[in-house]
Image (cartoon, coloured by chain):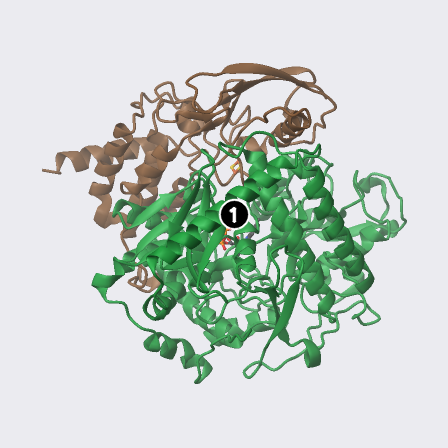
Chain colours: A brown, B green
Amino acid sequence: MVLKLKIWRQEQGQKDGRFESYVLEELSSDMSFLEMLDQLNENLVKKKKVPVAFDHDCREGICGSCSLVINGNPHGPHTGSAVCQLHLRSFKDREEVWVEPFRAKAFPVIQDLIVDRSSLDRIIQSGGYISVNTGSAPEAHSIPVEKGKAEEAFSNAACIGCGACVAVCKNASASLFVSAKLSHLNLLPQGQAEKKSRALRMVGQMEKEGFGACTNTGACSRACPKEISLRSIARMNREYLKAYLSSD
Amino acid sequence: MKFSAGIPSGPLEEKWDRHRFELPLVNPANKRKHQVIVVGTGLAGASASSSLAELGYQVKTFCIQDSPRRAHSIAAQGGINAAKNYPGDGDSIKRLFYDTVKGGDFRSREANIYRLAQISNHIIDHCVAQGVPFAREYGGLLANRSFGGAQVSRTFYARGQTGQQLLLGAYSALMRQVDRGRVSLYPRHEMMDLVVCEGQAVGIVTRNLLTGEVEGHLAQAVILATGGYGNIFYLSTNAMHSNASAAWRCHKRGAFFANPCFTQIHPTCIPRSGNYQSKLTLLSESLRNDGRVWVPKNAGDKRAPESIPEGERDYYLERIYPSFGNLVPRDLASRQAKFQVDAGLGVGPTGEAVYLDFKDAIKRLGKGSLSEKYGNLFQMYEKITGENPYEKPMRIYPAVHYTMGGLWVDYNLESAVKGLFVLGEANFSDHGANRLGASALMQGLADGYFIVPYTVAKHLVGGAAIAESKKERALKETCKEVEDRLKKVIQVGGSKTVDFFHRELGGLLWNQVGMLRSEKGLIGAIDQIQGIRENFWNEVYVPGEAGNKNAELEKALRMADFLELAELMAKDALARKESCGSHFREEYQTPDQEAIRDDENFCHVSVWESKDSQGKDWILHKEPLEFKEVSLSVRSYK
Ligand SMILES: Cc1cc2nc3c(=O)[nH]c(=O)nc-3n(C[C@H](O)[C@H](O)[C@H](O)COP(=O)(O)OP(=O)(O)OC[C@H]3O[C@@H](n4cnc5c(N)ncnc54)[C@H](O)[C@@H]3O)c2cc1C
Ligand code: FES
């Protein structure tokens, strides 16, 4: 098959970029989208041109590295998957495909399709953990966890930290990301001691990083490769408010 | 050169406790003054970084990805072993120890494995305290499942995402220490070389992957946790950035490389679909519980599977291993699939696959109950291949998955270079010639959380003092060498891409240093590897400059190191004139194609010392292995 690509190119250190057109022929519909980019890059290198920079690593939807917006959708047309899990059979022959980086104030573009998502690490750093030093843990069975709670904690812990929720949000809010971590830890008995400070610090850090406010459009949850629920955001708001009101 | 594994004396059960007691302590006020470098943020690196920082050391942590949370460990699926015996089915530290020694086909150290089994239980306690959401029973207690090579249920899991959850636990502990100011984080920084001064590791040289800047970092100890080298085969289940370079650079600076030819090939992966393929995806081997493996009886039968009648199918695993059938261990299942494909019986568009058929299981159990068990795997398969496994048999084929070989370390996890410690998949590990499922995560976390934070003290307290000026000089020289190497590969200015050479090398290794090895094949392979290496240095083309983000340049230098390591893998496989675990030499098999191990001559770790800087010459040392607790025996699955 043939694809007509329009890919965002932006040189390092430049404030702006532009779309460039590439036509790829003789593609197999079994190829993954990233393998198609590999092929484009191999062609570019052979022509002694600069290949397209993009982040990727596991290529199975779990590391959260890949971060492309395809025809306006973060991670492409399908729900519940990352762009590394997208295959060309999802496109029509001769289709025009627009490829852009995740865009948000808190995710500055570094080069081409690569953005800086270190703001997400700093949010985790501000409180996305349970304070327990190695060697000081009690016997694992001394902390039973209700199965339903454990399952819900897991569903939130499944966040891969890709930032698609931010990229799709018209306010570039990181609420789904932050609330997923808060929900994971706050639902568990182990997470209770730091519940309040965690909510205050993480939400505070999110604001500091320049992410926008949540207006409940629900786009984030639909774009999330792990389909994290909007309920998490509601939980975060409740907990933040409670913590805020009781903090002084 | 003399070297010793440094196994403590005393009864097996007491070795680790005694040793820990004898290790020196570092005064809390002094810990702050010790700078430790950790390279890698997978399970091993993230756990080591956080634990060292908690103890009070000043830590610098490096990784290739944009965030430490994205290390390759994130992709582990099945689970992590521990000897908790929660199901009450007779497990114990001793049994986990025993299974691991036997699973590794008697090519690992008893003392190390015993310690690993002892620590396994502390890992679960710690991870639960961190909030790792392991699967639980209705009563709220932890659930376990069974895995290959064990008769007890000892695997803890978090759906099919155990690696992700364990890594996020270690990452959160790491970020907590970043917040405390004890860890400085260097994401998108690749270690390019080890700085050695007067025989001790005193620092590393890195390249900032965004700016291209070559930077030097000095420290009192260097801890390497950079993962395995399965990607040398081009196609593997490893993440795209997994590589051998950090370990290889250390090898060339004096660290020994042990058992490089021990590579695990996993039987149930989604086959390659074309030449554009960039990596392979694993499907849990639990599928073999209900799927039946077969190929057509007649070579070249191109009919669709559903039109091949029962009488013309060969359910070869059931035929060859009537008692274990489709559930033989990984190495056997993989090897048999290769035999079928080599005989021209392979299926699918490339002919490099066998069928895994659920037709009978659907009849027996119904579609609903099958989807309850394997729904997510079937979905994953369909996402990648576009085929529905409820209607058409799956196509599967073995793929490179894990490397048991790695840098040689002693009981303290210290390499032959003093002050350089190696953890996780990067060391030659505790798995001998074959790793059991769910044991890599256990080993990585044991190394990082519970071993190295204590053993490193011995070097910090006892290492010889070196003048700062000498270290600075060594650092400068090493930086210069790195810069020269970067320039050199760009200056080749040929016309072929890095991937061109990688595919060529991968294909060669897969055929000659993969599931089946022979003297003739290995000798030929060594010759061909040297040829590819020469061509690489004459014909590779790397666009752009060293002074900024340049993915092709990163790949090129990793490739250059793969080309050297490949030769050592082949040499190691050639030198080991026996079949054991993952290493199967055609010359050493029974008439019915089972492995013949030679304990008389090969009950040792092959320990390779690099002799020249070109990566072409080595001395082979042997570390003898003694089995006092578990007696040497032959595995049989017929
Ligand atoms: C698909 C799959 C499934 C698996 N499932 C299981 C399972 O169920 N159970 C189990 O026990 N094991 C499993 N394994 C094996 C297990 O996941 C790995 O062996 C283990 O995670 C390795 O951890 P590590 O910390 O040693 O290295 P890795 O997780 O590979 O981390 C390496 C780190 O080093 C960094 N690095 C590498 N080179 C450099 C450099 N030059 N400079 C700077 N940083 C560098 C990387 O950025 C990364 O942070 C699986 C493996 C695969 C491929
Ligand atoms: S590359 Fe890892 S999630 Fe896409």
Q: Which quadrant is the C terminus of chain A positioned in? A: top left
Q: Is residue B136 visible?
A: no
Identified at 81% across, 72% down, the residue is B590
**Horizontal and vertical percent position of residue A218:** 39, 24
User: Residue B632, located in which quarter of the rendered image?
Assistant: bottom right
Residue at mark 1: C-beta within 8 A of ligand 1: no
State whether residue B344 is above or below residue B116: above
Residue type at mark 1 is Glu
**Horizontal and vertical percent position of residue B131:** 34, 51
Circle 1 chain: B
Q: Is residue A233 visible?
A: yes
**Horizontal and vertical percent position of residue A5:** 61, 18
Residue to which mark 1 is pinned: B481
Q: Dot 1 lies on which element? A: helix
Q: Is residue A153 left or right of residue B269?
A: left
State whether residue B345 is above or below residue B517: above
Viewer-proximal residue among A116 and B328:
A116
State whether residue B633 is above or below residue B96: below
Q: Which quadrant is the N terminus of chain A positioned in? A: top right
**Horizontal and vertical percent position of residue B297:** 88, 51
Q: Is the residue marked by circle 1 packed among few (<14), some (14-19), or many (20+) residues within 10 Å? A: some
Identified at 67% across, 54% down, the residue is B566
Q: What is the number of callouts on the image?
A: 1
Identified at 72% across, 77% down, the residue is B598
Q: Is residue B479 left or right of residue B106?
A: left
State whether residue A165 is above or below residue B321: above
